[in-house]
């Protein structure tokens, strides 16, 4: 990409380039809510930031088996867009991932899309040790399933409860 000197100066005057990389399209309520909340905080704290979003798969494909081949296919367009030799102006200063698939792809050493770019994650269903083993220089919020803690909370809040019904999905 070629820039005139005045365009290059306006890019330099802009705030940080931030990429929100979401595992799934924006239409599931939870994905939209997370992205909207992240954008609101960024807008308040970094009003000149250039915030872009990208989505890896549609929600109806969320049960895909994640293989190295699939990750390479997903990484190709992202690499061309943000990390290729002609995309220096689009290389993010910060990557924020939403959900495990986005984190897995952004930190996978085999696909190596965002080397050296600071990373913040949200909703990663891994242990802290797994995250540190993959990439020690990132931070974020882990998603944790705590069935015993949830039932304990229900019983403390509603001591008369005698039956608890659980509705769950595989995602």
Image (cartoon, rainbow, N blue to C red):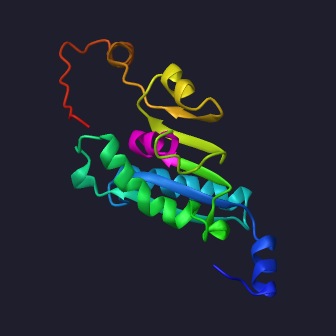
Q: Is 93 inside the magenta-drawn segment?
A: no
Q: Is residue 35 above or below residue 124?
A: below
**Where does the C terminus fall, quadrant-wise?**
top left
Q: Residue at x 41, y 31 (%)?
A: 125
Q: List x then y, in percent, for residue 105.
A: 44, 45
Q: List x then y, in percent, for residue 59.
A: 27, 54
Q: Is residue 15 above or below residue 107?
A: below
**Where does the N terminus fall, quadrant-wise?**
bottom right
Q: Give residue 28's quadrant in the image.
A: bottom left
Of 167 and 5, nearer the camera is: 5
Of 166 and 38, nearer the camera is: 38
Q: Is residue 159 above or below residue 63?
A: above
Which stretch appears magenta?
97-108
Q: Is 101 inside the magenta-drawn segment?
A: yes
Does any portion of residue 24 appear in the rendered image?
Answer: no
Q: List x then y, in percent, for residue 145.
A: 36, 24
Describe residue 127's horizontal placement relative to residue 18 as left or right: left
Q: Residue at x 51, y 47 (%)?
A: 97
């Amino acid at each position: 990409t070629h820039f005139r000197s005045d365009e290059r100066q306006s890019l330099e005057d802009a705030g940080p380039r931030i990429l929100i990389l979401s595992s799934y399209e924006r239409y599931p309520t939870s994905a939209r809510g997370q992205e909207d909340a992240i954008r609101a905080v960024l807008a308040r704290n970094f009003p000149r930031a250039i915030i872009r979003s990208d989505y890896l798969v549609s929600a109806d494909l969320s049960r895909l088996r994640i293989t190295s081949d699939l990750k390479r296919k997903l990484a190709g367009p992202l690499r061309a867009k943000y990390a290729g030799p002609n995309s220096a102006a689009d290389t993010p200063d910060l990557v924020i991932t939403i959900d495990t698939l986005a984190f897995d792809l952004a930190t996978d050493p085999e696909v190596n899309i965002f080397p050296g770019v600071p990373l913040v994650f949200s909703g990663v269903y891994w242990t802290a040790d797994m995250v540190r083993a993959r990439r020690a220089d990132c931070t974020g919020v882990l998603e944790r399933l705590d069935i015993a803690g949830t039932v304990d909370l229900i019983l403390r809040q509603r001591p008369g409860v005698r039956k608890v019904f659980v509705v769950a999905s595989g995602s």
